[in-house]
Image (tube, grey):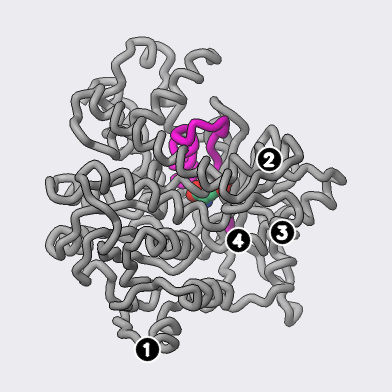
Amino acid sequence: MNEYVKRVSDNLIRLYSHEPEYLQSALTWLEMIAPAVDDPRYEKMDLLSRMVEPERMFSFLVPWVDDYGVVHTNHGFRVQFNSAIGPFKGGLRFHPSVTPSVVKFLGFEQTYKNALTGLPIGGAAGGADFDPRGKSNREIMRFCQSYMNSLYRYLGADTDVAGGDIGVGSREIGYLYGQYKRLTARSESSALTGKGLTYGGSKVRQEAAGFGAVYFLNRMLEHRGEKLEGKRIAVSGFGNMSWGVCRKATEFGGKVVTLSGPDGYIYDESGVNTQEKFDFMVQMRMSGVDKVKPYADKFNVPFFAGERPWEVEADIAMPCATQNEIGVHDAVAILTNGYRYYVECANMPATRDALKILRMSKKVLTAGSKASGCGGVAVSALEMAQNSVRYSWKRAEIDQRLQDIMGSIYDASVAASEKYGLGYDLIAGNDIAGFKRIAEAMMAQGL
Ligand code: GLU
């Protein structure tokens, strides 16, 4: 490996061994972009050290009172990772697993994901170790208000634009935006994205993450002269990303046969492909129970407690749940159960070892979440654009733009991979394409 890359990697290991998710995402990225660290000015300007660390990061306490009058104190975070190509932009995650390391890895991934969209958005991420499971609407509202009391001074349409992620959907964005508006006395709609359609939200935003992943998958299929029609897809998770994948895959004649939750997975031989099933997924998510078994009970299909969907034979694996959900055991299952496409939808769904195993296979085409998973934030950027011109485009226009963006990310990934002699390597290609875009902007702006 390039000496400079090695030095930056060693430095990260020395400094951040206590932040495993962040270290994992940064080291994997450095490995992928190493062949493209080909300009001596990068080292002279110590560009890589400035690209792998956040520009700044905040943590704050989020005290709130539950419906029984009991006080709780959660921990909130926001990492403003990189602003080279636009205002900081990224989601908020409310989940008990949120730590500084998780927020930093999300900010890192978001930065290079956003660069790939070709839209003027920098990278950020945030969240809290709040567990939305079993909380009432009022509790969620009070939590969001307290969260915004601490965060509002750091957000802004031209500063840092927050959006959704796990545990933060349009209901939470509504409460957060309401409080932001109250505190700032400004109707600054693009300080938050994922808003409701009546107050500046974009059409297709809810569907965008999953739709985008399927558009990307279609290009991979096309590369092999194949079509989605008749293919079986194993999906993990049952949240917003999975829901969009099920809907768009159904439209193209593909069949999603699994969904999963922390409790296990369901196997639906006939496919998750009716309006009733899509609506039930939304209901399961909104119930705040975080279990997928109710789907099996409702539609009378098998449920496998504590198991992972990749033990099912299918053509396409689409991990839509969360980071590190694919371990070595899962990677081996994907290689042995007939899969020919592995399309990351969640942020960094595979461990480093699992990803190595998957990438060794010639049979399985792999796509990285910074590319295939960026439909959501792409439409968030379109939401910002619509807010700034006080206009709202038609649904079909936005869907077409999303499709174009996913296509250009695919093309850029293929081109970067070929340029650096890596053949058809979509993951290295997307990392290199994102790296080059931000590197150029940072070099132009000086230290
Ligand atoms: N959390 C989403 C993502 O991973 C979207 C964030 C946003 O819309 O800002 O890209």
| Residue 322 image position (x, y, % from top left) | 41, 59
- At x 67%, y 77%, the residue is 136
Q: How far apart are marks 4 and 1 (CA)?
A: 28 Å
- At x 68%, y 34%, the residue is 159
Magenta-drawn segment: 104-128
| Residue 291 image position (x, y, % from top left) | 45, 78
Can residue 435 be found in the magenta stretch?
A: no
Amino acid type assigned to the residue bearing label 2 in the image? Gln
Please tell me which of labels 1 and 3 falls first in the chain: 3
Q: Is mark 1 on a helix, strand or loop?
A: loop
The residue that mark 3 highlights is: 174
Q: What element carries label 2?
A: helix
Please tell me which of labels 4 and 3 falls first in the chain: 4
Q: Nearer the viewer, residue 271 or 446?
A: 271
Q: Nearer the viewer, residue 272 or 58?
A: 272
Please tell me which of labels 3 and 2 falls first in the chain: 3
Mark 4 vs 2: CB contact within 8 A: no
Q: How far apart are marks 4 and 3 (CA)?
A: 9 Å
Amino acid type assigned to the residue bearing label 4 in the image? Gly
**Which is in the foreground here, disc 4 or disc 1?**
1
Q: Residues within 10 Å of mark 1 (few under 14, many from 20)?
A: few
Q: How crowded is mark 3: few (under 14 residues within 10 Å), some or many (20 or more)?
A: many
Amino acid type assigned to the residue bearing label 3 in the image? Gly
User: Does residue 224 appear left or right of residue 144 in this picture?
Assistant: left
